[in-house]
Image (cartoon, grey):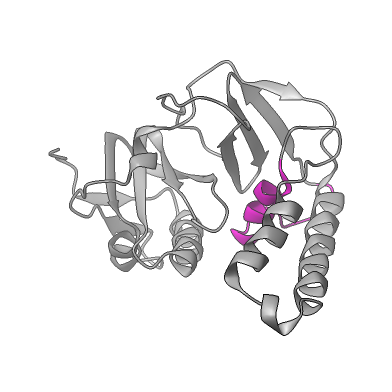
């Protein structure tokens, strides 16, 4: 597709820095990562999929001007274009996106779900799970120390649900790894659901994923500042 906008002007330098940090974390997990960008009004939603977690990560940033576009680009090229000190960047040429870029959460209908622990408890749950993984991995006899055995341990641990919700622990792990679980202990976190989708929302970004056993489908998540 053709995108007429070539330059990006962010609301301030911190918005550009936050986007750069998010892209850097995505690239840590996939050096060839692509991101889908949806701009509407004065906000830009950036969607990525870190392969280690099998979730969608969403980071919203504020723009200085009312852009409007929907395009998939290289995360690395977008990161390289950012001038954090100037609060600006350049929109890279579009790329053919991986399949996940066509399957985004729906725009509306999100309802908050009960049972989600607070941010401190979520962080503790991830730390305990990492410790358990290392302990179980270290206890494997040499002949069973394979990728397949480690994957089995990982699936057992990270598929567990959090609190009284359907949210798998891997979604919380992804939120922590991507910098979405940080700040003061009392910062707000929420679990939202609509149709086949779940969404862990924090002030720094969101993690979205389909419920276990959900069929495929297409949709578009509304662009909004604050994740």
Q: Could you tell me residue 116's position as x and y percent?
A: 82, 36
Task: Give the residues in magenta.
Answer: 168-186
Q: Residue furthest top?
A: 109
Is residue 102 positioned above or below 36 on the image?
A: above
Instruction: Specify whether residue 176 is painted magenta.
Output: yes
Identify whether 15 is placed above or below 212: below
The residue at the point 33 percent across, 64 percent down is 76
How many numbered tags mark residues here?
A: 0
Residue at 81% in and 64% down: 127
Location of residue 137 in the rendering, given as x and y in whole percent from the top left corner: 75, 73
Query: Residue 134's quadrant in the figure?
Result: bottom right
Which residue is painted at 47% across and 61% down in the image? 26
Name the residue nearer the viewer: 82 or 146.
146
Please report the residue visible at 87 percent of the width from the left and 51 percent of the height from the top.
121
Q: Check the image and report above or below for 151 versus 194.
A: below
Residue 141 place in picture, x, y as percent: 76, 80
Instruction: Describe residue 110's horizontal placement relative to residue 1 as left or right.
Output: right
Q: In x, y percent, where is residue 20?
A: 44, 62
Please name whichever residue, 71 or 128, is drawn nearer the observer in this view of the structure.
128
| Residue 46 sits inside the magenta stretch | no
Q: Is residue 185 visible?
A: no
On the rendered image, what quadrant is the N terminus found in?
A: top left
Identify the image quadrant of the C terminus: top right
């Amino acid at each position: 597709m053709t995108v007429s906008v070539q330059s990006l002007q962010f609301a301030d330098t911190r918005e550009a820095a936050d986007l750069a940090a998010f892209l850097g974390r995505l690239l840590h997990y996939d050096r060839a990562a692509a991101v889908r960008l949806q701009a509407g009004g004065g906000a830009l939603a950036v969607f990525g999929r870190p392969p280690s977690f099998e979730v969608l990560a969403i980071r919203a940033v504020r723009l200085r001007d009312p852009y409007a576009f929907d395009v998939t680009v290289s995360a690395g090229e977008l990161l390289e274009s950012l001038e954090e000190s100037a609060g600006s960047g350049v929109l890279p040429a579009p790329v053919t996106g991986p399949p996940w870029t066509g399957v985004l959460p729906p725009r509306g209908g999100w309802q908050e779900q009960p049972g989600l622990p607070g941010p401190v408890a979520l962080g503790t749950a991830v730390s305990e799970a990492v410790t358990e993984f290392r302990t179980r991995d270290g206890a494997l006899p040499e002949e069973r120390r394979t990728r397949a055995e480690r994957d089995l341990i990982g699936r057992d641990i990270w598929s567990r649900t959090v609190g009284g919700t359907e949210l798998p622990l891997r979604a919380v792990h992804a939120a922590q790894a991507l910098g979405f679980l940080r700040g003061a202990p009392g910062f707000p976190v929420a679990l939202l659901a609509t149709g086949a989708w779940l969404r862990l929302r924090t002030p720094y970004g969101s993690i979205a994923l389909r419920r276990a056993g959900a069929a495929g489908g297409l949709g578009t998540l509304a662009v909004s500042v604050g994740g």
